Amino acid sequence: MTVASLTAAVQQDTASHGVETAAVEAVNAAHRRALFKKRGKIHPKRVNGAFRMTKWAMMALTLTIYYVTPWLRWDRGPGAPDQAVLIDFPGRRFYFFFIEIWPQEVYYITGLLILAAVALFLVTSLAGRMWCGYACPQTVWTDLFLVVERAIEGRRNDRIKLDRAPLSVEKVAKRTVKHAIWLLIGVATGGAWVFYFTDAPTLMGQLLTSSAPSEAYFFIALFTATTYTLGGHAREQVCTYMCPWPRIQAAMLDEESLAITYRFDRGEPRGPHKKGDTWDGRGDCIDCRQCVAACPMGIDIRDGLQLECIQCALCIDACNEVMAKVDRPRGLIAYDTDLNIARRQQGLPTRFRFIRPRTVAYALILALVSGVMLFALLKRSDLDVSVIRDRNPTFITLSDGHIRNGYTVKLLNKARSQRTISLTVDGLSGAALTAVGLPTADDGSLQVPVEGDDLRPVRVFITLPHELVVHDSMPLSIVARDEAAARPIKVQSVFLGPKP
Ligand code: SF4
Ligand code: SF4
């Protein structure tokens, strides 16, 4: 083969390979187009009705709680913060009205999270995504941002027109005002958040005089940006793509769980309907798509239950308005169950069963965790004691033959005032308790002063005559007593010695 023919062959091969590569890339691009749908902006229509009213009420309630809570005061006495709800990182404390949680008691927070999760499971198994539709911050803030959008840009059709219109003075003015108000809402949201972490009136004063700590400005800026982005721009995409809950919640549902349902058994066959036409031989759905126009997720509930549906019930209100206009019964879209649709098709009456094995199980877990937490709170003492025995050496033999073990006793005084704790040993006859620099009372107890709101570690020694060491490991208790405490606190430990 000559060089010329070889080059031609290579060029031909390269050319055909190039064609092949282009074909593969075209196929891949087609796949990509099929997999990734371009987002179309959603312009939800405003509706009126019972569920919209409920959502307004929930919005007012949740926003009031969020913005007002840091300003509530709670008198805890001198020297203590008087903010009712405060996450005090420098003081390592969480205050919630009369409850004060120390870092050592983080299990209360764990318990609260478990309670919240099980309550969410219970509500979901009873009535679907109630949380998402009514109380989730993403839903509430998106609704708030939409209120602003409607107030400035008008109704649904006006907003669609404005989106499609070329740039004009009016469009720029409306957009500027809308985004400025969105940013203000973001600032208020971020501002309220930082008030939970420090004394709100003090921080407000510092913010007004530009003397607040730099962390405050950083977190206000961060939450302003996230609120503005998630509530104003990302909106339904947060629920569809970012939130894991839609994927998980299906595990809590069964055929008797309430869900926003298009009653296709009543609605189909759908089609336009003119005044005076008969309703015989057709369904109640007039295919007006008002339910789709009202949906903040941009979906059609008539396609069945979908992952995107946050169960906000606005399509129920939209359809009820339509049903009233065409003089048909309300509830073509309603809270219903799969089982009821099947029962109606069989001519059986509808049935709602709230007491089911899974709802009972969730309710029992909820009651159990609540009971344990309540019991722990009621039994909570303002004195905590822990004992750590020395591991190396486990014991030492003194020159007079006595055996001595060392321990570190940690006394946590949760009261605000100083108190003296008396330490004794129980269950080890003949034992002497001593500590360097601490007085011993006539009854042999150690007297340990502990400052208010403080943790004091104390090195103590327990000494036993050699002849009383009858085992190489003998159980004992270190007992902490305080006049103010209702009962002494006993901590189990052991005394180690040589094999007898
Ligand atoms: S609003 Fe009601 S009648 Fe109109 S399309 Fe939706 S389900 Fe059908
Ligand atoms: S389908 Fe209905 S309930 Fe679901 S998100 Fe849309 S409007 Fe809300």
Image (cartoon, rainbow, N blue to C red):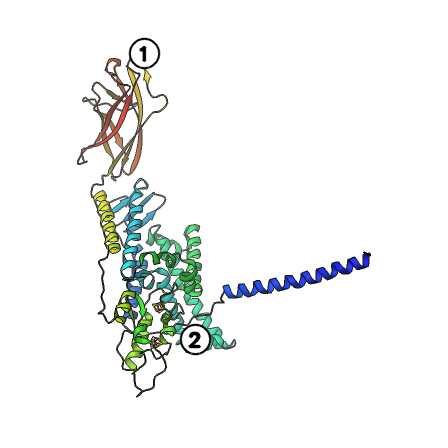
SS category of the residue bearing label 1: loop
Q: Is residue 418 above or below residue 397?
A: below
Residue 77 x, y percent position in the rendering: 24, 45
Q: Is residue 489 above or below residue 326?
A: above
The N terminus sits in image quarter: bottom right
Q: Nearer the viewer, residue 447 or 59?
A: 59
Q: Is residue 146 above or below residue 473?
A: below
Contact flag, marks 2 and 1 (Cβ < 8 Å): no
Extreme top residue here? 400
Residue 448 x, y percent position in the rendering: 26, 29
Q: Amino acid at mark 1?
A: Ser
Residue sitting at 68 percent across and 60 percent down?
A: 17
Q: Amino acid at mark 2?
A: Arg
Residue 474 x, y percent position in the rendering: 25, 22
The C terminus sits in image quarter: top left
The residue wearing badge 2 is: 159
Q: Nearer the viewer, residue 3 or 113?
A: 3
The residue wearing badge 1 is: 399
Quick check: which quadrant has ligand 1? bottom left
Residue sitting at 43 percent across and 60 percent down?
A: 241
Q: Quadrant of residue 57?
A: bottom left
Q: Nearer the viewer, residue 452 or 138?
A: 138
- Label 2 to label 1, Cα distance in Å? 93 Å
SS category of the residue bearing label 2: helix
First-in-chain label (2 vs 1): 2
Tell me the number on the disc at residue 121.
none
